[in-house]
Image (cartoon, coloured by chain):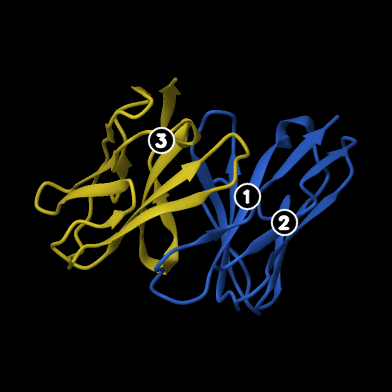
Chain colours: A yellow, B blue
């Protein structure tokens, strides 16, 4: 079965510091995409970053970057210079056949002023 | 960027009545639309996948007759909760993708359903 695991239900970080959220997944595919989505209190799902598995270079979007370890099936999200607006639920997602997403259970991130 | 809207954002209905939720892709054609249900502090649970002009594919355990999905056009999908009961109260989210394989899904803002 293809699954996504987020082992950190809650994380906290001081404002301006760096935090890393973990995600592992299981797949037998060789080419695929991985996503991190953010869900703030408004509950609108927002794409944070996307990684293409065939690209060895880790994706980066401003203060957000990933550490993609294909062999280990690990896809962690690093948030640098954390801001109060980063407080949200973060979901790791893997699309299976038919475009359907497997979502992890989520990590609730608190940013401490 | 691609925008998906949902209407209504919040609905309250009486037990036994039906309620329809609309999901629209505003600036792209959605080949596939998805409906999710989310309980507080939990992840998104996929309910069904729909492609324009064809019947929706429901996930195991989701009642087809209770949650009617119609994907009438490339920009509109509707979810009708029939004979709603308090246990159907939840947050419903739709998403859309414009091509396969999924490069990403674009999410609507969600609909909070409260059944009294």
Q: Quadrant of the C terminus of chain B?
A: top right
Q: Which element is circle 3 on?
A: loop
Residue at left 37%, top 33%? A82
Q: Which element is circle 1 on?
A: strand
The residue nearer to you, when weighing B39 against A60, is A60
In percent of width and height, residue B94 lies at 62, 56
Q: Quadrant of the N terminus of chain B?
A: bottom right
The residue nearer to you, when weighing A32 against A84, is A84
Say few, some or many: other residues with alpha carbon within 10 Å of mark 1 (under 14 / 14 to 19 / 20 or more).
Answer: many
Chain ID of residue with mark 2: B
Q: Which element is circle 2 on?
A: strand
Q: Are marks 1 and 2 in contact (CB under 8 Å)?
A: yes
Q: Which mark is residue B93?
A: 1
Separation of disc 3 and disc 1 at Cα? 16 Å
Q: Is residue A9 left or right of residue A70?
A: right
Q: Which mark is residue B6?
A: 2
In percent of width and height, residue A14 lies at 35, 22
Asked if labels 3 and 2 share a chain, the reply is no
Asked if labels 1 and 2 share a chain, the reply is yes
Chain ID of residue with mark 3: A
Residue at left 51%, top 43%? B44
Chain ID of residue with mark 1: B
Residue bearing mark 3 = A105
Separation of disc 1 and disc 2 at Cα? 8 Å
In percent of width and height, residue A101 lies at 42, 55
Say few, some or many: other residues with alpha carbon within 10 Å of mark 3 (under 14 / 14 to 19 / 20 or more).
Answer: many
């Amino acid at each position: 079965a293809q699954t996504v695991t987020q082992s950190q239900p809650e994380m906290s970080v001081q404002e301006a510091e760096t935090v890393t959220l973990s995600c592992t997944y299981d797949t037998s595919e060789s080419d695929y995409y991985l996503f991190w989505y953010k869900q703030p209190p408004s509950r609108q799902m927002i794409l944070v970053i996307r990684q293409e598995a065939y690209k060895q270079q880790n994706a980066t979007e401003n203060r957000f970057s990933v550490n993609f370890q294909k062999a280990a099936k690990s896809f962690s999200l690093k948030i640098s210079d954390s801001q109060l607006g980063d407080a949200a639920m973060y979901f790791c997602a893997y699309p299976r056949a038919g475009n359907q997403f497997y979502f992890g259970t989520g990590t609730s991130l608190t940013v401490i002023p | 960027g691609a925008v998906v809207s949902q209407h209504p954002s919040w609905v309250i209905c009486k037990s036994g009545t039906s309620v329809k939720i609309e999901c629209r892709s505003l600036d792209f054609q959605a080949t596939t639309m998805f409906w999710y249900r989310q309980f507080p502090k939990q992840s998104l649970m996929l309910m069904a996948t729909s492609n324009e002009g064809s019947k929706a594919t429901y996930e195991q355990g989701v009642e087809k007759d209770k949650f009617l999905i119609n994907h009438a056009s490339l920009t509109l999908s509707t979810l009708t909760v029939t004979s709603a009961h308090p246990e159907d109260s939840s947050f419903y989210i739709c998403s859309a993708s414009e091509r396969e394989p999924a490069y990403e899904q674009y999410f609507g803002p969600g609909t909070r359903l409260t059944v009294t």
